């Protein structure tokens, strides 16, 4: 723990000392991240080097265009920064070409659709309530207004523990593809706890003459660390976010086959975006280099073993594991066997009060709305970065079960919050910055 100046100005150096109002908010957020459990499956703690690049002077520069082809002067250094990020991304994933400019995963997906499709073309993607993302054709997303989305889902749940079901139904993918003849098939999910093989999607895409896009937003870091199969050899295009398991700055990226490079680049800029965020591009370069190191392989493996330990603990507390368990970084639980009255919305709010941060999530064929839900989604990427291990995950599961059983008892929730704080104190996310008085 760090002593803090009386005016509350702390977090990222003295720069904010002229703005105590904002400094206080950053300080409060630093305290929240350090003293409560971060179990949102799409979040992580970036390295101090990623934070430094994100907060760098590169934010000052306009660089519309690409290295060697900019619309503004003064981009000699920026070109080298972006080239470094592109080279590191292609090397990390074994791809021909990378575009590191998308501001977010959603923009990366939109860019691919714009590059490969005409308005009204058919796209086959995962159903939202089965784990698909908003940009996979949600009625609320622009994607469904411009293109015609059809969907596939999961196999039914089963009581057989050796074949628990709720895995991608490739028969259904093939049937819908043959019937609808999509121009693009999208693999990948936002709430799916199993590995996704790209090869069966490739076979189906080839059979119906479709292109294949793999949305790798969630497991990108697991792929980089060798803990999830790499879709790059099979997909025409792979989109991903850099801030989830990959542990970089908030943003998106695309890797693709060489013959699609020009189309993809034009779709990102000028198709969708203006000036790239070169400070974030630099931070992406930092993250790609970090993810190529041997210790990142250990990290990715520990994310998965921790998720398994968390899943085992939650099952012992009486929650049902969607897909029967996990082999990636996330766990999706059905709350109904634990308590049929408990909704995801209430559980998320109760756990927030107990210092456990996660998100409610629909489960396959959820009878409740996406705003209420019958499930919770949890992930281990962030707390694994902070140093938690399998025993800690067992403890986390116990605390979740206890808090939800005692949800009407404020004193019990306060006790859980104190236990959470003690656990987090053993695993600070930024020990080096704490020592320097900066977190
Ligand atoms: N919102 C992200 C997630 O939490 O999975 C996806 O965009």
Image (cartoon, grey):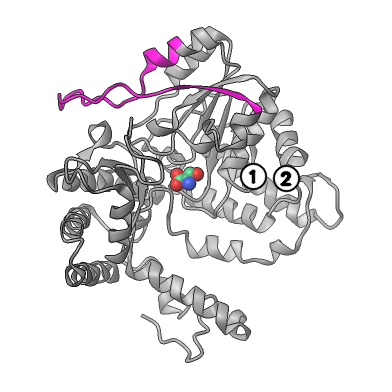
- Region in magenta: 146-175
The answer to whether residue 332 is left or right of residue 439 is left
* Residue 292 in sight in this render: no
Q: How many neighbours does mark 1 have within 10 angstroms: few (below 14), some (14-19), or many (20 or more)?
A: many
Q: Magenta stretch containing residue 147, yes or no?
A: yes
Residue 104 image position (x, y, % from top left) = 59, 46
In percent of the image, x 19 and y 63: which residue is there? 408
Badge 1 marks a residue whose secondary structure is loop
In the rendering, at what x and y percent does residue 20 appear?
56, 84
| Mark 1 close to ligand 1, CB under 8 Å | no
Q: Quadrant of the N terminus?
A: bottom left
Residue at numbered disc 2: 273
Give the class, few, some or many, for how many residues have Cα within 10 Å of label 2's Cα (few <14, many ≥20): some
Was residue 369 drawn as part of the magenta stretch in this picture?
no
Q: Label 1, label 2: how many angstroms apart (C-alpha)?
A: 8 Å
Compared with 383, 135 (above or below) is: above
In the picture, measured across the screen, residue 189 lies left or right of residue 379, that is right
The C terminus: image quadrant: bottom left
**Compared with residue 350, is residue 182 higher up or lower down, i.e. above or below?**
above
Disc 1, disc 2: CB below 8 Å?
A: yes
Q: Between residues 128 and 247, which one lies in front from this camera angle?
A: 128
Residue situated in front as seen by the camera: 324 or 70: 324
- For label 2, the SS is loop
Per the image, the residue denoted by label 1 is 102
In terms of secondary structure, what is the magenta stretch mainly?
Answer: loop
Identify the residue at horizontal 58%, vertical 51% (top origin): 284
Compared with 171, 90 (above or below) is: below
**Left or right for 434, reference 404:** right
| Residue 357: percent from left, percent from top | 34, 58
């Amino acid at each position: 723990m760090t002593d803090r100046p009386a005016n509350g100005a702390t977090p990222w150096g003295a720069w904010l000392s002229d703005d105590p109002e904002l400094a206080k908010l950053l300080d409060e957020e630093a305290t929240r991240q350090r003293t409560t459990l971060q179990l949102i499956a799409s979040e992580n703690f970036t390295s101090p080097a990623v934070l430094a690049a994100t907060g760098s002077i590169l934010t000052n520069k306009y660089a519309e265009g690409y290295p060697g082809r900019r619309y503004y002067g003064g981009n000699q250094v920026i070109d080298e920064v972006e080239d470094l990020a592109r080279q590191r991304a292609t090397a990390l994933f074994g791809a021909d070409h990378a575009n590191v400019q998308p501001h977010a995963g959603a923009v990366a997906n939109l860019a691919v659709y714009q590059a490969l499709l005409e308005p009204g073309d058919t796209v086959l993607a995962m159903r939202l309530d089965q784990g698909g993302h908003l940009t996979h054709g949600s009625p609320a997303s622009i994607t469904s207004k411009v293109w015609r989305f059809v969907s596939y889902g999961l196999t039914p749940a089963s009581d057989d523990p050796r074949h628990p079901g709720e895995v991608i139904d490739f028969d259904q993918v093939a049937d819908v593809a043959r019937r609808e003849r999509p121009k693009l098939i999208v693999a990948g999910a936002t709430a799916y706890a199993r590995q996704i093989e790209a090869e069966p999607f490739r076979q189906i895409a080839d059979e119906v003459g479709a292109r294949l896009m793999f949305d790798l937003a969630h497991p990108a870091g697991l792929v980089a660390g060798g803990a999830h199969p790499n879709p790059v050899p099979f997909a025409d295009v792979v989109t991903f976010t850099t801030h989830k398991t990959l542990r970089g700055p908030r943003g998106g990226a695309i890797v693709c086959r060489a013959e699609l490079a020009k189309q993809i680049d034009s779709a990102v800029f000028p198709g969708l975006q203006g000036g790239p965020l070169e400070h974030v591009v630099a931070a992406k370069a930092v993250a790609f280099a970090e993810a190529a190191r041997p210790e990142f392989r250990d990290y990715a493996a520990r994310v998965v073993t921790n998720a398994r330990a968390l899943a085992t603990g939650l099952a012992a507390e009486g929650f049902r594991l969607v897909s029967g368990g996990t082999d990636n970084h996330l766990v999706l639980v059905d709350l109904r066997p634990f308590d049929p009255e408990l909704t995801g919305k209430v559980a998320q709010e109760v756990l927030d009060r107990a210092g456990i941060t996660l998100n409610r999530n629909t489960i396959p064929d959820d009878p409740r709305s996406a705003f209420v839900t019958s499930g919770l989604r949890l992930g281990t990427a962030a707390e694994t970065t902070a140093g938690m291990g399998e025993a800690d995950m067992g403890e986390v599961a116990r605390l979740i079960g206890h808090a939800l059983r005692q949800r009407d008892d404020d004193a019990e929730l306060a006790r859980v919050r104190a236990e959470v704080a003690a656990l987090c104190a053993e695993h600070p996310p930024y020990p080096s910055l704490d020592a320097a008085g900066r977190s």
